[in-house]
Image (tube, rainbow, N blue to C red):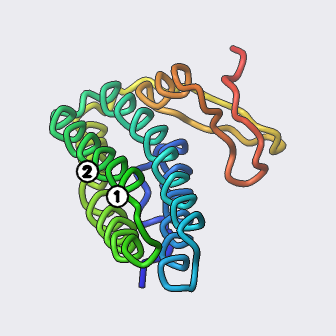
Amino acid sequence: MLPEWSDKFSVHNEIIDQQHQTLFKLAHKAYKIANAHTTRNEVKSIITEFFDYMKTHFRDEEQYMQIIGYPRLEAHKKIHRALIADMASMVKNIHSANEIKDKILVIARDWLLTHILQEDMLIEKYRKESAKSSPSQKFYIYTCACPGKEHKLTESMHLFVKNTAQNVRCKECQQDIVIKDK
């Protein structure tokens, strides 16, 4: 069985965390499909959905790693490329629903457990250590629809929010956060 999303898996970047939560949901959906009577098209559909979302997530995650100066960026990109290649090969070579079900389980479990829970946690460890070594870090204040609430973003998170195509939402009101006028 696959683990459920937990805050202990957080990399403390709202966009990446939201994407990881979506990937957990997709992995669970893939796991259910793999363990049920399904058609080849149903199996292919979940793999395609997973594959498409992974590409978006990897792009955003790589941008975040670049912004924070993550030293293992190139190695992490290679892992991403290998996962994309594996998924592309699976989508192209589906011959039967049963044949691919085992592969779905491996990708959902191994990708989720190995990549997010191990590789991506190294990014968070680096971010934490960097924050400790830069106590005079500049912060940016963002607001949302919650009355009086402010979101304090580090400079790297601010740059990421500014440069990503995806909006960042408050976890409580589910509205986009915007930089506070000075």
Residue 167 or 12: which is nearer the viewer? Answer: 167
Q: Which mark is residue 171?
A: none
Q: Which residue is mark 1?
A: 116
Considering the numbered disc 1 on the image, is that residue within a helix, a strand or a loop? helix
Q: Residue at x 34, y 65 (%)?
A: 107
Considering the numbered disc 2 on the image, is that residue within a helix, a strand or a loop? helix
The amino acid type, in three-letter code, at marker 1 is: Ile
CA–CA distance between discs 1 and 2?
13 Å
Q: Residue at x 52, y 60 (%)?
A: 44
Mark nearer the viewer, 1 or 2: 1
User: Quadrant of residue 110 in the image?
Assistant: bottom left
Q: Looking at the figure, which quarter contains the C terminus?
A: top right
Q: Residue at x 24, y 54 (%)?
A: 119
Residue 158 or 88: which is nearer the viewer? Answer: 88
5 vs 128, left or right, is right
72 vs 5, left or right, is left
Residue 149 or 119: which is nearer the viewer? Answer: 119
Locate residue 77, reporting x and y percent: 24, 36
| Most distant residue in the top direction | 182
4 vs 79, left or right, is right
Label 1 or label 2, whichever comes before in sequence order? 1
Binning the other alpha carbons within 10 Å of mark 2 as few (below 14), some (14 to 19) or many (20 upward) gives few
Q: Residue at x 39, y 50 (%)?
A: 92
Q: Is residue 50 above or below residue 156?
A: below
Locate residue 138, reporting x and y percent: 43, 23
Residue 80 or 177: which is nearer the viewer? Answer: 80
Q: Which residue is mark 2?
A: 125
Q: Looking at the figure, which quarter contains the N terminus?
A: bottom left
Locate residue 179, reporting x and y percent: 66, 23
Locate residue 140, reporting x and y percent: 55, 25
The amino acid type, in three-letter code, at marker 2 is: Lys
